[in-house]
Image: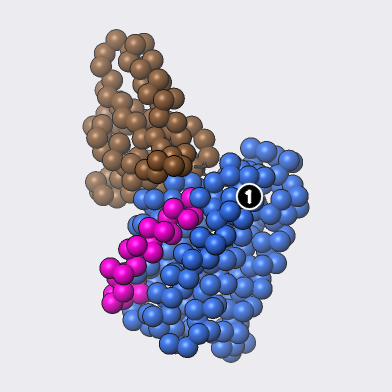
Amino acid sequence: MVSLVLVSHSLPLAASIANLIQHIVKEDVNIAIAARVDDPEHPWGTDVIKIQQAIKSVYSDDGVVVLMDLGSAVLSAEMAIARFSESEDIINPLQWQQSG
Amino acid sequence: MISQQQIINWIDNFAAVIAENKDYLTELDAAIGDADHGINMNRGFQKVSEKLPTVIDKDIGTILKTVSMTLISTVGGASGPLYGTFFLKASAVAAQKEELTLEELVQLLQAGLEGVIYRGKAELEDKTMIDALSPAVDAFQQSLTNNDSVVEGLQKAVNAAEEGMKKTIPLIARKGRASYLGERSMGHQDPGATSSYLMLTTLLKAVREEN
Ligand SMILES: Nc1ncnc2c1ncn2[C@@H]1O[C@H](COP(=O)(O)OP(=O)(O)OP(=O)(O)O)[C@@H](O)[C@H]1O
Ligand SMILES: [Mg+2]
């Protein structure tokens, strides 16, 4: 079964979405959250390494869908997917799409 | 020749300049973004300052790679992956090098710029850091054929970056958060272009001071 990674600037938002999904889907879905940055004063942001770790934590051959909110979440997720693909020696799905 | 010490001074100095301009960059971002560019950059470069002593005797490639990894894991905003990729691509050009020729410094900045374009897919006049970096690299490259000195070449690059930065004011943003504002992004200078301009001024300063 496909796993999910939720990338968000807001931890409560991501946690609520994860909760809602678990309620809707009958089976157990693997959901990992990558939200906020490690800065207690200014937690607002997204962290490439955290996203990469989140992908790794739920990865299976069925694949992972990475969902994100806004702004830097997109760039950070793209870079995390590139770094994860490289580290696991698998094809980066984003590049595969681009080249046809 | 540009020495390893000058590169260290550049990074060290850029971290200090970012700290000094933290509020200014954040104000610029408040107008068209989410008021965090200075905070993001400062969070990243404070960590870079802490890490710098651990690579003080390493080659330039290792130093720049360390800068890259630190930025990727701490900055948090769009500028994290973008500056992280800039320094990652730059580090590849300087792998195992203790000093750089003028040509190599041009290649280093060119590779960094290409990395930012690859990662962010922005074009000229999208109102991003590309608007400062791209004309600067062009001017620097041009000065190679003019047989300029490193300082002359970098001065031209800084002038071009400053011009590019100011030219972002009337533009409508097409990339990043500012693009959500559409026409309302007009009339404001892009924060990322401003930090990129500062990065080049500190490089010029480091190269100008003998070592
Ligand atoms: N796709 C892009 N290509 C090049 N530069 C970009 C791109 N997107 C944004 N930028 C630059 O990044 C700057 C904003 O960086 P900042 O650190 O404030 O991130 P942010 O977009 O606010 O991130 P977040 O969504 O986490 O708040 C912009 O001023 C612009 O120069
Ligand atoms: Mg911002």
B63 to A80, vertically: above or below: below
Residue A51: quadrant of the picture? top left
**Amino acid found under the numbered disc labelled 1:** Glu
On whether residue B121 falls in the magenta region, the answer is no
Which residue occupies 39% across, 80% down? B5
Residues B145 and B154: in front is: B154
- x and y percentages locating residue A11 in the rendered image: 40, 29
B92 to B81, vertically: above or below: below
Q: Which chain is brown?
A: A
Residue B70: quadrant of the picture? bottom left
> In the shown orientation, is residue B71 left or right of residue A2?
right
Residues B42 and B90: in front is: B42
- x and y percentages locating residue B205 in the rendered image: 54, 78
Q: Label 1: chain?
A: B
On whether residue B48 falls in the magenta region, the answer is yes
Q: Quadrant of the N terminus of chain B?
A: bottom left
- The residue wearing badge 1 is B27
Which residue occupies 26% across, 13% down? A27
Range of magenta residues = B40-62
> How many dots with numbers?
1
Instruction: Give the crowd class for mark 1: few <14, some 14-19, many >=20 residues within 10 Å.
Output: some
SS of the residue under disc 1: helix
Which residue occupies 73% across, 40% down? B184
Which residue occupies 53% across, 40% down? A71
Q: Which chain is blue?
A: B
- x and y percentages locating residue B138 in the rendered image: 61, 72
Q: Quadrant of the C terminus of chain B?
A: bottom left
Residues A26 and A43: in front is: A43
Question: From where the camera sits, is residue A81 visible?
Answer: no
Question: From where the camera sits, is residue B94 visible?
Answer: yes
- x and y percentages locating residue B121 in the rendered image: 54, 50
